[in-house]
Image: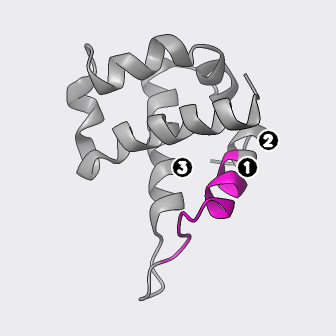
Amino acid sequence: MTKQSNLLKRFQVWMEQNGYKKITQSNLPSTISDYTSSLLRICAWESKTPEQVAESISTILPQYTIGEHSARGRMKSRAVRCSIRAFNKFLIETQVA
């Protein structure tokens, strides 16, 4: 990832402010890193930018939680499903989309 979107940076700041961890006790990447990479994975699967995913969140969220892509939503210890839910919560709380 060469250039990170402004929305993705704001999502990371929001996660940190809401108690999500940047690093583990053993100095390894933690939840913020997992959720960021999982959200980027969703963007790649959907061929969309984070901003476009935000605009389509009402369609995309159910696909990865209960719909046709729910198997993908269980990948990587459920980080994909959790990341899209956290992203939706971020969008609602900050009223970005």
Secondary structure under the numbered disc 1 in the rendered image: helix
Q: Residues within 10 Å of mark 2 (few under 14, many from 20)?
A: few
Could you tell whether 79 is left or right of 93 in the image?
A: left
Secondary structure under the numbered disc 3 in the rendered image: helix
At label 2, the amino acid type is Asn
Return the residue at label 3: 36
Q: Residue 8: image x %, image y %?
A: 68, 43
Q: Residues within 10 Å of mark 1 (few under 14, many from 20)?
A: few
Is 5 placed above or below 61 here? below
- Range drawn in magenta: 11-23
Res 75 → quadrant: top left
* Structural distance between the alpha carbons of marks 2 and 3: 13 Å
Q: Residues within 10 Å of mark 3 (few under 14, many from 20)?
A: many
Could you tell whether 21 is left or right of 72 in the image?
A: right
Decide whether residue 20 is among the magenta residues: yes
Q: Residue 23: image x %, image y %?
A: 51, 76
Is residue 77 something one can see in this rendering? Answer: yes
Looking at the image, which residue is at 46% across and 17% down?
60
Return the residue at label 1: 9
Q: Are marks 1 and 2 in contact (CB under 8 Å)?
A: yes
The quadrant of the image that shows the C terminus is top right
Looking at the image, which residue is at 51% across and 60% down?
33
Decide whether residue 68 is among the magenta residues: no
Q: Earlier in the sequence, mark 2 or mark 3?
A: 2
At label 1, the amino acid type is Lys
Q: Residue 35: image x %, image y %?
A: 48, 50
Is 49 placed above or below 75 here? above
Return the residue at label 2: 6
Looking at the image, which residue is at 44% across and 79% down?
24
At label 3, the amino acid type is Thr
Which disc is residue 71 wearing? Answer: none
* Structural distance between the alpha carbons of marks 1 and 3: 9 Å
